[in-house]
């Protein structure tokens, strides 16, 4: 009987303990539910302000009012039902860089915590700040004779692929994506055929000058589209196009801690086949170095020699045993010993090599690749390279080469991990009835590059 009483007594104690603990358990469970709701709301709010911030930044070129409206629209779409009203502002950082700041606060009505009046409605806030870095970009455009075919300025009798017409439609739209203000981005434009020029020196307020420059291009001559390679650039005004772009970008000072992105966009409709060097051509009487562009052919054995100051002046071609001319009067190049020059300084082979079309073209590719690697490994700010190839002249081999220049990760055979990854775009044809589609495809390529650049400008 005593044992039974003890059991009954213990049962009574359990009921009492449960009565005391159950409200606490319910409160903890309720608190967990409310905290979960707050966490979910915070996550949704953070995603929404991030999306709004990026959208406003990407559309900043349309004006702050439009950018804020588009950002708010994306915020609402991401948040869902009953969104709070975000605040979209446009502060300036300490380096003068444009920022977008999006802040929003949502009030969450609690279920269990509401019994404590001060916790009946809990505010949850989130903020996102995007800093638009300064863009320093050079555009390098092919103006060789094969780009003719439409309404462009062309050599008489030249039948090309209409690339020039497509280019003149796409480039003005492309540069319109960037900050054209007097304190915004800085852009340059260069072009090449048998020679190379800087058509617009890197500067602010670039939109109209670059539009005018691309519309004024005349399409004639060969394809001197290379870089200086492992040697110094021969001329800062008539040097190798990729290296001219490097000089333009490098002339913009970078402040400590400044958010800056450097880019080169390279467009061509064929394989580069022309290089540039300085030769001793005056014999024993004149030891002045003469700047000469040479090459100009994709096949055969002929090597032509061009005046680097002109897209149309062809001094003549190399003839075995006779040498090559280096003036409009046909003077034959002779070295300081009076011997006829028959070799050129091949960077790819590291020695003097007998002049031939294949050797020159191989060196053009080597010099371009070495210049691209130097650009991508610059310190403190490396350069992103984007390439576009147009037309049947851009063969499968040339496509792979242009992808290598861009360090496109879609071409794993040549992609260098750890260096800035660019992209290569190929447009198959601009000839005849394909012109309309070509214009659309080229514009899409440029706009895709713009989107990638703008995304990198935002951090």
Image: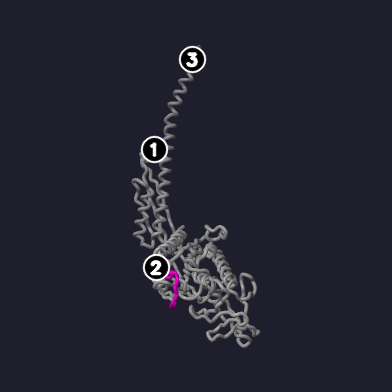
Q: Residue furthest top?
A: 1
Which disc number belongs to residue 5? 3
Q: Quadrant of residue 404?
A: bottom right
Residue at 55 percent of width and 60 percent of height: 419
The one nearer the camera, 388 or 429, is 429
Q: Secondary structure at mark 3?
A: helix
Magenta range is: 155-178
Mark 3 residue crowding within 10 angstroms, few (<14) / some (14–19) / many (20+): few
Q: Secondary structure at mark 1?
A: helix
Up/down of 287 relative to 182, above or below? below
Residue for badge 1: 113
Up/down of 283 relative to 120, above or below? below
Dot in front, 3 or 1:
1
Mark 2 residue crowding within 10 angstroms, few (<14) / some (14–19) / many (20+): some
Dot in front, 2 or 1:
2
Dot in front, 3 or 2:
2
Residue for badge 2: 169
Image location of residue 190, percent across then percent down: 47, 72
Query: Spatial distance from mark 2 to mark 1, Cα to Cα?
Result: 62 Å
Image location of residue 387, percent across then percent down: 49, 64
Q: Quadrant of residue 280?
A: bottom right
Which disc number belongs to residue 167? none
Up/down of 43 relative to 308, above or below? above
The one nearer the camera, 61 or 441, is 441
Residue at 42 percent of width and 72 percent of height: 149
Image location of residue 262, percent across then percent down: 49, 65
């Amino acid at each position: 009987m005593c044992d039974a009483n003890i059991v009954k007594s213990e049962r009574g104690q359990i009921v009492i303990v449960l009565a005391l603990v159950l409200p606490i358990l319910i409160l903890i469970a309720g608190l967990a539910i409310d905290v979960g709701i707050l966490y979910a709301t915070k996550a949704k709010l953070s995603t929404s302000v991030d999306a709004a911030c990026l959208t406003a930044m990407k559309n900043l070129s349309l004006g702050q009012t439009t950018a804020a409206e588009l950002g708010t629209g994306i915020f609402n779409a991401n948040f869902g039902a009953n969104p709070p009203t975000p605040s979209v502002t446009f502060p300036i950082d300490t380096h003068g860089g444009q920022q977008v700041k999006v802040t929003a606060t949502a009030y969450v009505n609690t279920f269990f915590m509401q019994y404590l009046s001060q916790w009946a409605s809990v505010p949850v806030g989130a903020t996102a700040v995007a800093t638009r870095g300064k863009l320093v970009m050079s555009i390098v455009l092919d103006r060789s004779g094969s780009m003719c075919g439409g309404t462009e300025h062309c050599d008489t009798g030249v039948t090309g692929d209409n690339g020039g017409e497509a280019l003149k439609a796409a480039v003005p739209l492309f540069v319109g994506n960037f900050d054209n203000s007097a304190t915004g981005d800085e852009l340059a434009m260069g072009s090449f055929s048998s020679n190379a020029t800087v058509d617009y020196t890197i500067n602010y307020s670039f939109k109209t000058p670059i539009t005018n420059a691309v519309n004024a291009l005349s399409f004639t001559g060969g394809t001197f589209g290379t870089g200086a390679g492992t040697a110094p650039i021969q001329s800062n005004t008539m040097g190798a196009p990729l290296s001219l772009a490097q000089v333009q970008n490098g002339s913009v000072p970078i402040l400590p801690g400044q958010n800056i992105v450097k880019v080169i966009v390279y467009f061509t409709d064929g394989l580069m086949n022309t290089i540039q060097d300085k030769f001793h051509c005056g014999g024993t009487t004149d030891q002045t170095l003469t700047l000469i562009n040479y090459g100009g052919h994709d096949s055969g054995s002929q090597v032509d020699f061009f005046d680097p100051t002109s897209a149309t002046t062809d001094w003549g071609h190399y003839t075995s045993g006779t040498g090559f001319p280096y003036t409009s009067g046909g003077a034959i190049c002779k070295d300081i010993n009076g011997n006829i020059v028959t070799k050129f300084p091949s960077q790819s082979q590291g020695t003097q090599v007998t002049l031939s079309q294949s050797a020159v073209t191989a060196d053009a590719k080597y010099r371009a690749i070495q210049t691209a690697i130097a650009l991508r490994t610059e310190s403190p700010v490396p350069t992103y390279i984007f390439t576009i190839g147009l037309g049947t002249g851009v063969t499968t081999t040339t496509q792979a080469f242009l992808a290598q220049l861009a360090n496109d990760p879609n071409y794993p055979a040549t992609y260098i991990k750890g260096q800035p990854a660019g992209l290569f775009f190929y447009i198959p044809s601009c000839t005849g009835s394909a012109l309309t589609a070509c214009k659309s495809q080229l514009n899409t390529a440029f706009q895709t590059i713009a989107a990638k650049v703008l995304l990198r400008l935002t951090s």
